[in-house]
Amino acid sequence: MIITVQIFLLMMVLAGVGIILFTRNIVHAAYALCLTLLGIAGVYVLVMSELLAVVQIMLYAGGVVILLAFGVMMTNRLRGEKVLSGSNNKWIGRIISVGVFAGLCYLISISPFQTTSVEKNEDQIAQIGVSFLTDHIVAFELIAFVLLVALVGAAYLAKNAADE
Amino acid sequence: MIQISGFGTVLLFIVGGIGFLMITLLVGKLLRPNNPTTEKQTTYESGEEPSGTAWGQFNVRFYIVALIFLLFEAELIFLFPWATVFGDEQLIAESDGLWAQFSMIETFIFIGILLVGLAYVWSKGMLEWVRPKPKASDFKSRIPESAYKDFK
């Protein structure tokens, strides 16, 4: 059963990535990105990280993809035509991406990941909540400041770009 | 066999939903007659003639609102773990109610800091929606107003 789910998620992620790589229509690429991110959320569930899975679905599949779609929808060169991406610098792009892939593979292979099975933790989210309010209270409040800075900065930049 | 809590059900729903949709569409494709005409292939058959495409340019306001939404969604994520524990009876009993007060105050500070951001975007008018401005026409009719009264 679990292996079926793993294969299903792998296919989901790879299908999304494949569409993103080979489609020239940016809107289709955004939808495919949504598929990939949902697949990654499934992977988080499989490795017992439920909060991360929820974050992945809400923030990435729900938020970032919408932001991307809006970004495509309001591009200036869109005048009743489909937005197609060109492909430039193909060989440099291929070399860089293969290099990054090889580097990541090397990093993953030398990293001391924990390979023993993890015990399922029933109230993982509650434990995170307790640690937010006890050991990591400063970090918890600092997060609010970081979010505030990000909000004001993003809104300011977007407003300026909109007024131009 | 690992137990994946309620997420197995979620996956079952996703697979079931996709499966039902696929089967329905496939059955429809097999059963229906395929006889397309130009009339049938218009966006609204026997309706409004569409002009241009649906891929128009959206207002940039959508983007700003989506950005603000994303930031507040990130805030919401951090409130999830808090929401599961702030009313924990055992923790409150162990700390003589101090836990409840502390967690409430800390979280109100957390939300309060973000509210400053909300006040900022609100005061800068970023939440205001664009309304179409009614344009007064400067067209002057050569037919005098009295003519309408005569022919009433």
Image (cartoon, coloured by chain):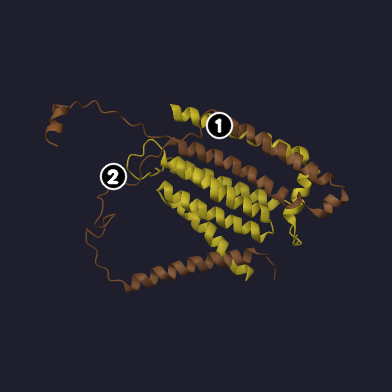
At label 1, counting other C-alpha atoms closer than 10 Å, the crowd grade (few under 14, some 14-19, many 20 or more) is many
At label 2, counting other C-alpha atoms closer than 10 Å, the crowd grade (few under 14, some 14-19, many 20 or more) is few
Query: Measured from the top left, where is residue B16 in percent x and y?
Result: 52, 68
Instruction: Name the chain letter of the residue that bears numbered label 1.
Output: B
Query: Which residue is at 27% across, 71% downward?
Result: B33
Q: Are marks 2 and 1 in one subunit?
A: yes
- Tell me the amino acid under the disc marked 1: Val
Q: Nearer the viewer, residue A72 or B53?
A: B53
Query: Measured from the top left, where is residue A47 in percent x and y?
Result: 68, 59
Q: Nearer the viewer, residue B73 or A89?
A: B73
**Colour brown maps to chain:** B
On residue B52, the disc is 2
Instruction: Name the chain letter of the residue that bears numbered label 2.
Output: B
Query: Which residue is at 47% across, 49% downward?
Result: A30
Residue B77 appears in the rendering: yes
Query: Is residue B11 placed above or below B59 in the rendered structure?
Result: below
User: Sequence order check: which comes first, mark 2 or mark 1?
Assistant: 2
Query: Is residue B30 placed above or below B73 in the rendered structure?
Result: below
**Colour yellow maps to chain:** A
User: Is residue B89 toward the left or the right of residue A28 in the image?
Assistant: right
Q: Quadrant of the N terminus of chain A?
A: bottom right
Q: Nearer the viewer, residue A53 or B151?
A: B151
Query: Measured from the top left, where is residue B38 in percent x and y?
Result: 22, 58
On residue B121, the disc is 1
Query: Measured from the top left, where is residue B144 in percent x and y?
Result: 14, 26
Q: Secondary structure at mark 2?
A: loop
